[in-house]
Image: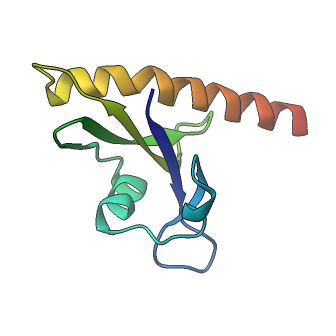
Amino acid sequence: MGSRSVYAMPAGKSEPRVIASGKASDLGEPGGQQEKQCLEQGTVFYGKDKDTVTVMMALHDRNGEIVAAVKVTMNTFFGQTDQNAAARARPIIKFMERRIIGSLDKLE
């Protein structure tokens, strides 16, 4: 499995920041226009290089509101397409959404 980074828009800020990552050095790093667009509009982004594929998707709360953008990087394979990369990333995002909803339920 590859790596994950979670971006959110801090209160009072106009650009997203990394709030969780597999690499501690990434925490607090600014996101770019794609991260901002994913947070604001739920746009899915896809990128591929020789060995990896990266998919960025919106993370939703129980009300369907976008609360974060998650970038998932995975190993690629011959014939990798944007559709099957998104299909591979979607269960990871859904698992994270269930964890967030479960955590929020414990706070109430």
The answer to whether 57 appears left or right of 48 in the picture is right
The answer to whether 83 appears left or right of 17 in the picture is left
* Residue located farthest toward the front when viewing the structure as drawn: 51
Residue occupying image coordinates x 15% and y 23%: 80
Task: Tell me how the rendering is colored.
Answer: rainbow
Seen in the picture, residue 79 relative to 6 is either above or below; the reply is: above
**Tally of marks:** 0
Residue 72 at x, y percent in the picture: 41, 38
Residue occupying image coordinates x 59% and y 31%: 97
Residue 32 location, quadrant: bottom left
Residue 88 at x, y percent in the picture: 34, 21
Residue occupying image coordinates x 47% and y 78%: 14
Residue 29 at x, y percent in the picture: 52, 70
Q: Can residue 69 be seen in this view?
A: yes
Residue 101 at x, y percent in the picture: 70, 31
Residue occupying image coordinates x 42% and y 67%: 31
Residue 82 location, quadrant: top left
Seen in the picture, residue 77 relative to 57 is either above or below; the reply is: above
Quick one: 103 or 76, which is closer to the camera?
76
Q: Can residue 108 be seen in this view?
A: no
Q: Where is the C terminus found, in terms of image quarters?
A: top right
Quick one: 91 or 23, which is closer to the camera?
23
Quick one: 42 or 19, which is closer to the camera?
19
Q: Where is the N terminus found, in terms of image quarters?
A: top left
